Image: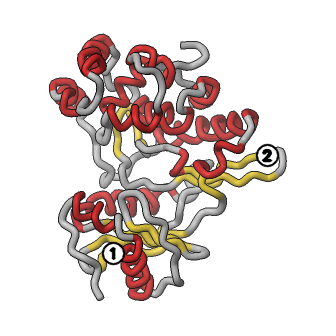
Amino acid sequence: MQLPSVADDAQFDALMADPDQVARCLEYAATALGVAPVSTPVRGSALIGLSESSVIKLMAPFDNQLASVEQVCLRTLHGALPVATPRLIDSGTLDGWSYVHMTRLPGVELKECWPTLGSRHKLSIATQLGECLPILHQLPAPAEIPRCDWSSWATNRVVNIHDYLRDVPPAWADVVPQVLESADLSAGQQGWLHTEVMLEHLLVQVDGDKVHLSGLFDFEPSWVAPVHYEYASIAMFVSAGDRSILSEVLRASHLTVSPERLFAMAMMHRYGKLAWYKQRLGGPDDLQTWIQTFFSTDTL
């Protein structure tokens, strides 16, 4: 057996739609790499295999650059942040696919337990996250981490914004350019970003009255860009309309940022599609109200 030839996102999605094939690929890779048998969660932009103590991540050949970014992030960040990140065990290529073999962090995925946590635990997590991220943002980023030419990026995104507004109501598509025109799109403080801090990429351990943020992973989309770009993802994929959570993350990060700038940063996200945001988050049908719902804090 060999790993299949996958040339683009459509072929990768077809592979991911076949759980049996995904399982066979990961079983083959684990055997070839001398790793213990793995379970096979089927989701995301890579093939992920979990053993008791480690993780195999297989990235399709067209994502080899992202694999290189993940490798350098794991080498550099292990032990450097208040929140644990995986330790790189090995990396390389197998049948044209890039693989990253890393340690498995303790805890459960925050997405699994978030609905069951009380407000005190959620605010504690928000504090820990807000204290961790500025440390990442201030670390010297290795040369392999992509640098975003923000002025060119933002200008190009605004000019082509309608490409990212497909499948949204016409009223929204008409208003978004006006919001971006009036929003602050300057670079401001820049730093080394994770770019996709979300419940799915965080691990926690709950011990009675205390909750500990035990892991942050999935670093392949990292780049150097405005730090507010990081918090737009948190507004959508962690706090998701809970102003107290977003407020606490920003307070612990010593930041103040307007809802309009956070929304603008969400629209600048390289994988950002407004229709997907709306589908995932739900919320009001009026765009301005939607922006205030998901990007406002207790003070703004």
Q: Nearer the viewer, residue 159 or 75?
A: 159
Classify mark 2: residues with Cα within 10 Å, few (<14), some (14-19) or many (20+): few
Task: Determine which of the numbered discs, if any, sits on residue 210 in the image.
Answer: 2
- Label 1 or label 2, whichever lies nearer to me, is 2
Classify mark 1: residues with Cα within 10 Å, few (<14), some (14-19) or many (20+): some
Q: Mark 2 is on which residue type?
A: Lys
The vertical placement of 41 against 37, above or below, is: above
Seen at 28% across and 42% down, the residue is: 147
Q: Which residue is mark 1?
A: 92
Q: Nearer the viewer, residue 268 or 137?
A: 268
Q: Is residue 260 visible?
A: yes
| Percent coordinates x, y for residue 29 in the rendering | 39, 81
Q: Is residue 151 visible?
A: no
Mark 2 element type? strand
**In which image quadrant can residue 51 be found?**
bottom right
In the picture, measured across the screen, residue 53 lies left or right of residue 150, that is right
